[in-house]
Amino acid sequence: MTRWTVLPERFDTPDATALRRDYYADVAGSHWGRPATDAEIDEGLADDGVARLASPTGEFVVGRRGGRAAACGGVLLLDTERAELTRVFVRPAFRGTGGGEALLSALEDAARRLGARRMVLNTRLDLVGARTLYARQGYREIPAYCEGPYMDVWYGKELVPREGSTAA
């Protein structure tokens, strides 16, 4: 059985950059009902705040299956208690193979290391697969904590310290 590995990685490595482009193309294309152009992807990624997904404010991870870069995600510390999941993406060819669960586990661990006690996220109603994944992993709908053009539903989850961790 091919296993997933999910490790921290700079957001600007070739693999991370390709995954971020695929993420934006997938999310924007599904929203617009047509494929996003390269120019639209470039515009969407310009100044998107991804640089904050590095210590001490966040972390970016890349998931690999069979050695192939197949997924990515980030966690951003919002305040002393909350971290936000962002840019969670599994390439379509790898969906249904455990990558989403592996990403969430790694990102929740990253949030704990950053000192967060609660994870939050926002998403669109039409991203049914993502919403199903979040619910399966213990996320529950919460009141809106932010607003924006592509935000329809908000989720939260208490981060229980893992056994053997030194997190408070």
Image (spheres, rainbow, N blue to C red):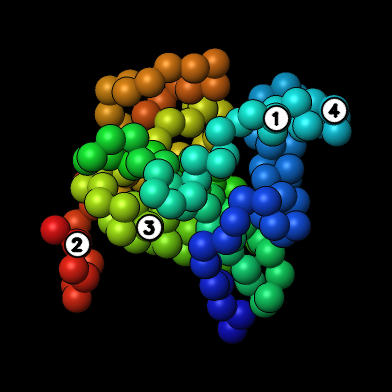
In space, the residues marked 4 and 2 are separated at their CA atoms by: 43 Å
- Report x, y in % for residue 55: 43, 52
Is there CB contact under 8 Å for labels 4 and 1? no
* Residue highlighted by disc 2: 167
Q: Earlier in the sequence, mark 2 or mark 1?
A: 1
Picture quadrant where residue 87 is located: top right
In space, the residues marked 2 and 1 are separated at their CA atoms by: 35 Å
Is there CB contact under 8 Å for labels 3 and 1? no
Picture quadrant where residue 145 is located: top left
Amino acid tagged 2: Ala
Dot 2 falls on a residue whose secondary structure is: loop
The local crowd at label 4, few if under 14, some if 14 to 19, many if 20 or more residues have their Cα within 10 Å, is few
In space, the residues marked 4 and 1 are separated at their CA atoms by: 11 Å
Residue 39 is tagged as 4
Dot 4 falls on a residue whose secondary structure is: helix
**71 relative to 18 in the view: left or right:** left
* Residue highlighted by disc 1: 46
The local crowd at label 3, few if under 14, some if 14 to 19, many if 20 or more residues have their Cα within 10 Å, is many
Amino acid tagged 1: Ala
- Report x, y in % for residue 101: 45, 60
Who's the residue at 40% across and 44% down the image?
Answer: 57
Q: Quadrant of the C terminus?
A: bottom left
Name above or below for residue 71 compared with residue 24.
below
* Residue highlighted by disc 3: 110
Mark closer to the observer (4, 1):
1
Amino acid tagged 3: Ala
In space, the residues marked 3 and 4 are separated at their CA atoms by: 32 Å
Count of numbered labels shown in the rendering: 4
Is there CB contact under 8 Å for labels 3 and 4? no
